[in-house]
């Protein structure tokens, strides 16, 4: 099953440590997104990217960073500044952001826990 | 501000009963509305979108601009419909998606 691949499936972080979550897509989509999923809160947008070498903050970007050096890849780094990083993280992609009715395709997610 | 609300965290119905999952939104322009579904141990996936006016797996949803609602309906629920359902909105130029908190549908035998 291709499309979007997130790794690892489970990740543990020590206090004060940065960790990077991987997201790769082979759908040739221009736009990529990172969401955080917490119980009872739905999906909240962390960062999104419309094109290579460009990305924008979402609603809850503090404590996170991203890069978009390649079209296929959009890694998310959870920094030590993120005080409550324990959550389920979902990556998604879609055809170029400007085409309004194109739905998002999601990965399987990464569950991050603090040791 | 864009916002999507789903008032029910959990909805339980018996097999064969009608089901309606409620979704209300606030948006200043003309939004595009979607329903996403996440079955157990599967990834989040698109169920249907209002612009297509389609029926998927027996589900339909009508955009009511007057009531700012996009409720998901199915006349006869099946056990395999048990899943987490998210309503989502995006602007008419494909701006960020905004997701509701989700409703867990449980169809009882």
Image (spheres, coloured by chain):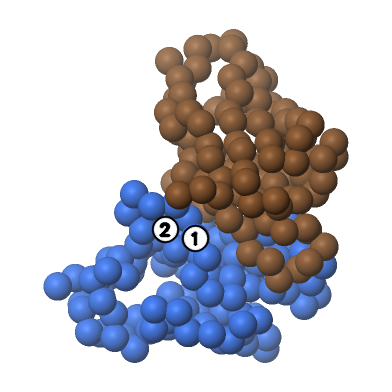
Chain colours: A brown, B blue
Q: Quadrant of residue A98?
A: bottom right
In the displayed structure, would residue B69 be above or below residue A63?
below
Residue placed most toward the observer, B72 or A71: A71
Q: Position of residue A35 (x, y in %)?
A: 60, 44
User: Few, some or many C-alpha atoms within 10 Å of disc 1 (few <14, some 14-19, many ≥20)?
Assistant: some
User: Few, some or many C-alpha atoms within 10 Å of disc 2 (few <14, some 14-19, many ≥20)?
Assistant: some
Q: CA distance from mark 1 to mark 2?
A: 6 Å
Tag 2 secondary structure: strand
Query: Which label number is shown at residue B45?
Result: 1
Q: Residue at x 59, y 31 (%)?
A: A22
In the visual, does A23 lie left or right of A57? Answer: left
Q: Quadrant of the C terminus of chain A?
A: top left
In the displayed structure, would residue A36 be above or below residue A17?
below
Q: Is residue A56 visible?
A: no
Q: Which residue is mark 2?
A: B38
Q: Position of residue A17 (x, y in %)?
A: 59, 12
In the displayed structure, would residue A67 be above or below residue A36?
above
Tag 1 secondary structure: strand
Identify the residue at the far left of this view: B109
Q: Quadrant of residue B33?
A: bottom right
Q: Residue at x 62, y 44 (%)?
A: A25
């Amino acid at each position: 099953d291709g499309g979007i691949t997130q790794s690892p499936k489970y990740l543990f972080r020590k206090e004060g440590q940065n960790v990077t979550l991987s997201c790769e897509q082979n759908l040739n989509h221009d736009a990529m997104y990172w969401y955080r999923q917490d119980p009872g809160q739905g999906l909240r947008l962390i960062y999104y990217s419309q094109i290579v070498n460009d990305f924008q903050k979402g609603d809850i970007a503090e404590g996170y960073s991203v890069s978009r050096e390649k079209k296929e890849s959009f890694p998310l780094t959870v920094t030590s500044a993120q005080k409550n990083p324990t959550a389920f993280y979902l990556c998604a992609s879609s055809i170029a952001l400007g085409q309004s009715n194109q739905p998002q395709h999601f990965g399987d997610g990464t569950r991050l826990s603090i040791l | 501000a864009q916002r999507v609300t789903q008032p029910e965290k959990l909805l339980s119905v018996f097999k064969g009963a009608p089901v309606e999952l409620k979704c209300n939104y606030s948006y200043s322009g003309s939004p595009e509305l979607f329903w996403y579904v996440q079955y157990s141990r599967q990834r989040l996936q698109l169920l249907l979108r209002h612009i297509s006016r389609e029926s998927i797996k027996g589900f339909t949803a009508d955009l009511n601009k007057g009531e700012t609602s996009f409720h998901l309906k199915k006349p006869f629920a099946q056990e395999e419909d048990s899943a987490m359902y998210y309503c989502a909105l995006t602007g008419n130029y494909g701006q960020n998606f905004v997701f509701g908190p989700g409703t867990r549908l449980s169809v009882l035998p």
